Image: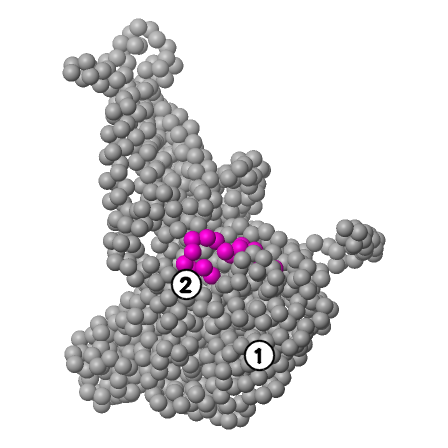
Amino acid sequence: MFAFILSRILQAIPVMLTVALISFAMFAYVGDPVSIMLGQDFTEAQRQQLIQDLGLDRPFFVQFGTFIGNALQGEFGLSYRLSRPVAELIAERAPATLELAFCAAAIAMFVGVPMGVYTGLYRNSWLSRAFLTFSLIGVSLPTFLIGILLILVFSVWLGWLPSFGRGDVVQLGWWSTGFLTWSGLKALILPSITLGLFQLTLIMRLVRAEMLEVLRTDYIKFARARGLGNRAVHFGHALKNTLVPVITIAGLQLGGIIAFAIVTETVFQWPGMGLLFIQSVGAADIPVMAAYLMLIALVFVTINLIVDLLYYLVDPRLRSSMGAARGGH
Amino acid sequence: MGMRAGAVRRTAVALAVLAMLGAGAAEAKTVRWAASGDPNTMDPHSQNTGTVTMVLQQIYDPLVKRNQDLSIAPGLATEWRQEEPTRWRFLLRQGVTFHEGETLTAEDVVFSLQRALQPTSNFGIFVDTIDRVAAVDERTVDIILKRPDPILPNKLASVFIMSKTWSEKHNATRPQNTRQREEMFTVRNTNGTGAYRLASREPDVRTVLARNDGWWGWSVEGNGGNVTEIVYRPIASDATRIAALLSGEVDFVLDPPLQDLNRLRNASGVKVLEGPEVRTLFIAFDTQRDELLYSDVKGRNPFKDVRVRQALYHAIDIQAIHRTTMRGQSVVTGTLFPEQVNGYVKAEDVRLPHDAARARALLTEAGYPQGFAVTLDCPNNRYINDEQICQNIAAMWSRIGVRTTLKAQPLAPFFAQIQRDDTSVYMLGWGVPTLDALYSFQSLLATRNGEQGDGIWNYGRYSNPRMDALIQRMKSETGEARQAAITEALRLYREDVPHIPLHHQMIPWAMRSNIQIPHMANNQPYFRWAVVN
């Protein structure tokens, strides 16, 4: 187990370095931060001075090497756009994104799994058909459109929910939370639904397909022959065995939710990391963009590792095969 | 301590009296304000952009203030005169205090102007003629210039005054620290003398300003605003910003998108205020290279020939752009800047008419009967409908045989590219913060020579010794002689066609119907003049 985790961590290092290199190379095309920082009026001398101050006159690999060296010490420099430490900016924004991602994932799981089970069990009921039609909409509508539609209905027409922002937040140490105020909770609803909808439909369809598959297998028939009740068969035997692929997909998608909250955050002016990233792209704020991409890569690597570990908990076959292999040597 | 308690008691008594009278002044009037971007910094001398200034001008005062028609009026200085050609004397207002209690002195003015002169300040253009600043006594400041500058007070209307002791205490004597890896105190803190003080600031989320009841200006006639609190929140998405206004979560939107204006005009409880902006869009040519980049013409640069530039000018149907792309929200122009700018001459604001036949004839005359290919560089998120305007122009040019490829990019890569002079022909929109002709001529049309301001935005590298001589005259002469130089330069601009002028932008503001605020051509809301019913 420990060897497995260690090998996974070692594998992650080249992945992180590659991401850093690619993102760093990409920055050559996002524009020149110097021209944005200088504003409308400047002299050539001021321009040269700034290029030198920022170290942009050094060769590419020297800049990259410095970046990696500093990043290893958790030092990402100052944001060009906001003149503030990047690590501090990201730490400030992370709670907003993580709370949003958590709510979106929770909605996707707690609504998606029961809907999937229902549509799998009662294939021909009208409600199942309604769920499936709904899921098609969820999969095919782009996120920004869903967001705008929700704002139009729930903020402009009905006036029930806020159209933007996080509401009032409470500061718990360095973590700012929207869970503790009424306005913070209300502000979470629309963005969470927008962000979670695609996930929700994906999980629902996946659970449904897996349920249909599993319900046909021999051990389900055997379970029924033993006289077990519907409840035990459906949830104790069938659902449990559908969960391995669901966990994989949901886990990987959690990384996706965090990484691609960009669109949702922009639509709802949600002050998270995605919005920070978009604003940084507009200003060619290389330190922030680099740090964000590295962080996202780290999130994916970590989630992959956790998903692999979860397999062991859910699927006993993997544990025994691993044990057998170890025993053989 | 005793004084403090006394002040509290007096305030309490005053509040009680007001409450008994039921006076409206004590009532809280909050304006929730939104626009697409958030100020990058709260430092008054670091970033010279509209987004930063729109917040800071509520907090800080300059020596010279602007009226609602953008003319100048006494600010922290009550009077000023040119004692000698290169020495101005400013007399400071007495009894002005900063939000943290310091009394304004001549030393603060000396410090602030010197701070704006530092290389990391983006406000160099407003103090470029200043040699040094000296405090004569507590309330008198002398500004000694390198050369005569007839528009110094106009320029100083853009330079905010800080407290010297406060800045020194917080180690913020410079506007930016590009070399060090520490955040400067002034990035998130302010201490001005203005009508509002910064109550709280969460960058990119919320900036709250509270009314400074002790502001010297409340007793000055015309400053009759009743807003007690301003909550600024950036909302980047156009649709969301408008939704927030319609749902009543926001009271004032500085930059509503054009396509939503009709809907906003018809919505109940919301109104749209329109006015011209001091920003002129134009197309500029590379008139310097011997062989054009991104073209099929080899060994020659067609844009060096004034007939080709005129041909492309004649090809543009600006009325069509005004009607369809801009939906009427533009002021068509034939000159470099709008009438709010000092030096404007109505008789020189004349376009070459739209005439495709004449355009083709001029191309033939210049030796390009079959036309040629060219790439037009445009931003796609900087000006109102910038990319669509360029699409129209590309189509209009293609119609006379100049096969135009449009390269539209976001502002960061666009500006990076044109600032390397890596362009044949490009679009630019030019605002004039000094509200004086010199700023436009100097930045856009002077030969680039490495000096502050000269030709720094002249990426077509237009160079005409006659124009340079006229710009020199604008820098030093005064009165009628100066206006004569400007008029002549405007005429030369029409004859030489270094640019094709397009239009001045109109800027709509959208707000709840209960707000009264004067529309300003510099696109700055002044909440000291706002009344909420």
Residues indicated by labels 1 and 2 sit on the same polypeptide chain: no
State whether the magenta stretch is mostly helix, strand or loop. Answer: loop
Q: Is residue B180 magenta?
A: yes
In this view of the protein, which residue sits in the foreground, A265 or A120? Answer: A265
Identify the magenta region.
Answer: B176-191
Q: Please name the residue shown 64% across and 72% down the image.
A: B106
Q: Which residue is mark 2?
A: A37
Q: Is B351 situated left or right of A65 in this image?
A: right
Q: What amino acid is labelled 1 in the image?
A: Ile
Q: Is residue A126 visible?
A: no
Neighbour tally class for label 2: few under 14, some 14-19, many 20 plus, Cα within 10 Å = many
Question: Quarter of the image containing the C terminus of chain A?
Answer: top left
Q: Secondary structure at mark 2?
A: helix
- Name the kind of residue labelled 2 in the image: Met
Question: To which residue does mark 1 refer?
Answer: B143
Chain assignment, label 1: B
* Cα distance between the residues tagged 1 and 2: 28 Å
Q: Nearer the viewer, residue B80 or A307?
A: B80
Determine whether A265 is above or below B277 in the image: above
Q: Quadrant of residue A204?
A: top left
Residue B163: x %, y % from top left: 61, 64
Question: Along the line of sight, which residue is nearer the eye, A191 or B36?
Answer: B36
Q: Which residue is located at x 42 percent, y 28 percent?
A: A110
Residue B157's label in the rendered image is none
How far from the left and from the top, in percent, is residue B325? 40, 69
Vertical side of B476 occupied by B189: above or below: above
